Image (cartoon, rainbow, N blue to C red):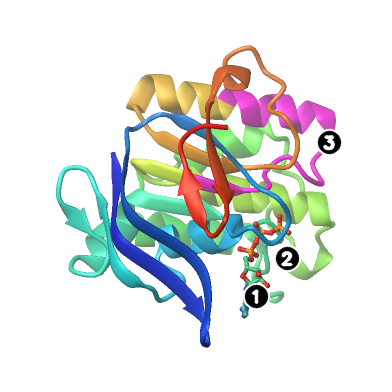
Amino acid sequence: MLAFHQFQKRYGGHLALEIPEMTIDSGIYWLKGANGSGKSTLLKAIAGLLSFEGQIRLSPDIYLKKQPVAYRKIVNFAEAEPLFPEFLTGQEMIRMFVTAKSASPGQEQYYLESMQMQHYINQPVSTYSSGMLKKLSLVLAFIGQPKLILLDEPLITIDSDSLQVLYRWIVEKHQKDGTGFLLASHQALEHDTLSKAQVLLVENLTLNTSC
Ligand SMILES: Nc1ncnc2c1ncn2[C@@H]1O[C@H](COP(=O)(O)OP(=O)(O)OP(=O)(O)O)[C@@H](O)[C@H]1O
């Protein structure tokens, strides 16, 4: 469960998003909205990457602002266009996330193998294509024991086989661990289970629960 209380995000003096009160039950949600409506802003705020007014709380009582470390340990985020320090390898990035998220050592192996990333994971990130970078960002988003995973445009740049693997990860993680998902995408989620995801719509500078 994710709750907003008097949430406002401004860029300078410009109001970008406002959610007076809203509670979202844990589940898999498709976050929709036109270009510039505020989807990335919302995900970055929930991830704790953007300052904002008001409160965001994760069930039962972990507040982003009051318990920033505990909150960030259980909320994972993959950006639409991920950027990583170019001199690090994918494996080094994973090692950092394993420590930060208190993950079980070796947890990443399942993800690396199913996405067939082992042959390049020890290469510097500067050598990765955009799809390889995207897959690394997706693996990082599944590291640890997240209660909520935020994926911004997860379907772009990855090939169709990888897309099927990603759909499987999402469904498995939700069914096994009860992890909630917010998936911001301009493309429909073409998967038996995910196509039934509830819709959250960002429009008119706010978030609505119906399409
Ligand atoms: N760093 C920033 N500084 C100023 N304004 C910003 C900044 N980032 C976003 N905005 C503005 O906030 C609004 C929402 O942008 P946001 O990137 O969240 O939209 P989006 O729904 O993710 O768009 P898209 O579908 O095109 O990716 C837009 O009006 C945008 O111009």
- Write the residue at 66% across / 64% down: 89
Task: Name which residue type carries label 3.
Answer: Asp
Location of residue 69 in the rendering, given as x and y in whole percent from the top left corner: 26, 66
Mark 1 closeness class: few <14, some 14–19, many ≥20 residues within 10 Å: few
Task: Name which residue type carries label 2.
Answer: Val
Q: As displayed, is residue 65 above or below residue 179? A: below
- Callouts 3 and 1 close, C-beta under 8 Å: no
Figure quadrant, ligand 1 = bottom right
Identify residue for label 2: 125
Image: magenta residue range: 150-168
Task: Name which residue type carries label 1.
Answer: Pro
Tell whether position 32 is magenta: no
Identify residue for label 3: 159
Query: What is the distance, in whole Å, between disc 2 and disc 3 at their CAs?
Result: 19 Å
- Write the residue at 63% across / 20% down: 195
Q: Give SS at disc 1.
A: loop
Q: As displayed, is residue 130 above or below residue 107? A: below
Which image quarter: residue 113?
A: top right
- Mark 3 lies within 8 Å of ligand 1 (Cβ measured): no
**Which residue is outermost to the left?**
61
Q: Can residue 120 be seen in the rendering of this structure?
A: no
Residue 140 located left or right of residue 99: right
For the residue pair 99 and 137, the one nearer the viewer reads as 137
- Callouts 1 and 2 close, C-beta under 8 Å: yes
| Label drawn at residue 85 | 1
- Write the residue at 57% across / 15% down: 193
Location of residue 166 in the rendering, given as x and y in whole percent from the top left corner: 64, 31
Residue 36 located left or right of residue 25: right
